[in-house]
Amino acid sequence: MQIAILGAGAFGQALAKILRDNHHASTFYDPLLFPEISLDQACRRAEAVIIAIPTEAITSFLAIYPPKLKQLPTILTSKGLFSLELFKEFPNFSIVSGPAFADEILAGHGATMTASSQFCAKLLHNQQIDIELSDDALGITICGALKNIYAIGAGYRAEAPDELAKYIQSAHQETKDYLARHGAQAATAELSCGLGDLILTCTNRTSRNFRAGQLLRKGQSKRTILRKLQTVEGISAATRADRKGYPLISEIYQLVNQK
């Protein structure tokens, strides 16, 4: 099968490896890394599309997205959205998310992810990648956004292991509450896209969000952190998230914005 991957960053490259291992062909669209390849060229023979672009670019990108491409099976892997309203005109849409770092996938390490469609599972499942299914696409995407926020708080608390363990428990409970109050399923927080991804991101010191929390602990500003790390998904997610009634999200928002 021919797959167009929109976004050739680290995770886009990891997805290409999975597809290659599963005997699928892929093409990249990424105007920064491959400026010579237009969206039309990348998708000319595509039978399905994977969106792996930075979350903050999705809204503007979809504003100019060709209607004919919306008809193709589309898989979202970007993390940071709290709504799927942008994809309401995609008749064959699904999402995949979970505890999987790109460099580990490229190195051949195994991972388990959560997908919202059988099509996605068949496309990505193999001996290295295990896929669990859930019909809660909204819950999967919310979990992917929240864990990046909580990872900043984990980095901030990194020097106190006992406090960190308690913090992850609280973040997990807050995730369940958030899902239940925003039209998703609280049980999705127990899946790989929920608890699995939360634990991985909140304990892995190579995570940009975790490192951002460490830099905040050292007194560095948001501007300095973004200059050093370039992309910190949890910072933008903390701005977009509902903070009322969610003390951890509110705390991290205030830390990031030095309020």
Image (cartoon, rainbow, N blue to C red):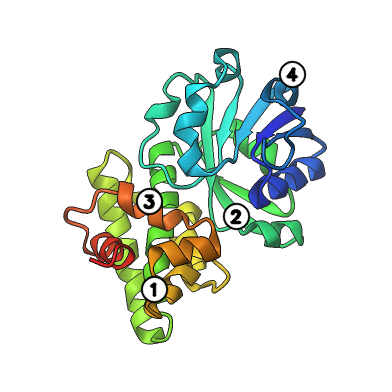
Label 1 with label 3: CB-CB less than 8 Å: no
Q: Gap in Å between the C-alphas at discs 1 and 3?
A: 16 Å
Marks 1 and 2, how far apart in space?
Answer: 31 Å
> N-terminal of the two: label 1 or label 2?
2
Residue type highlighted by circle 2? Thr
Disc nearest the viewer among 4 and 2: 4
Instruction: Identify the mark nearer the N-term, 2 or 3.
Output: 2
Give neighbour class at mark 1: few <14, some 14-19, many 20+ (Cα, 10 Å): many
Between marks 3 and 4, how big is the CA–CA gap? 33 Å
Marks 4 and 2, how far apart at CA: 31 Å
**Residue type of the residue flagged with mark 4:** Arg
Cα separation, mark 1 vs mark 4, equals 45 Å
Residue 194: give x, y in percent of width and height: 43, 55
Residue bearing the label numbered 2: 112
Q: Residues within 10 Å of mark 2 (few under 14, many from 20)?
A: many
Q: Position of residue 40 (x, y in %)?
A: 70, 20
Q: Which mark is residue 247?
A: none
Residue at the top extreme, as displayed: 68
Q: Which residue is mark 1?
A: 216
Q: Nearer the viewer, mark 1 or mark 3?
A: 1
Tell me if 196 is positioned left or right of 35 in this view: left
Amino acid bearing label 3: Ala
Residue located at (64% from left, 29% from top) = 49
209 in relation to 29, above or below = below
Crowd class of label 4 (few under 14; some 14 to 19; many from 20; radius 10 Å): few
- Going from N to C along the chain, the mark reached first, 1 or 3, is 1
Residue 75, x across and y down, in percent: 57, 33
Disc 3 secondary structure class: helix
Position of residue 241 measured from the top left corner of the image (x, y, whole percent): 30, 49
Point out the frontmost of discs 2 and 3: 3
SS at badge 1: helix
Q: Secondary structure at mark 4?
A: loop
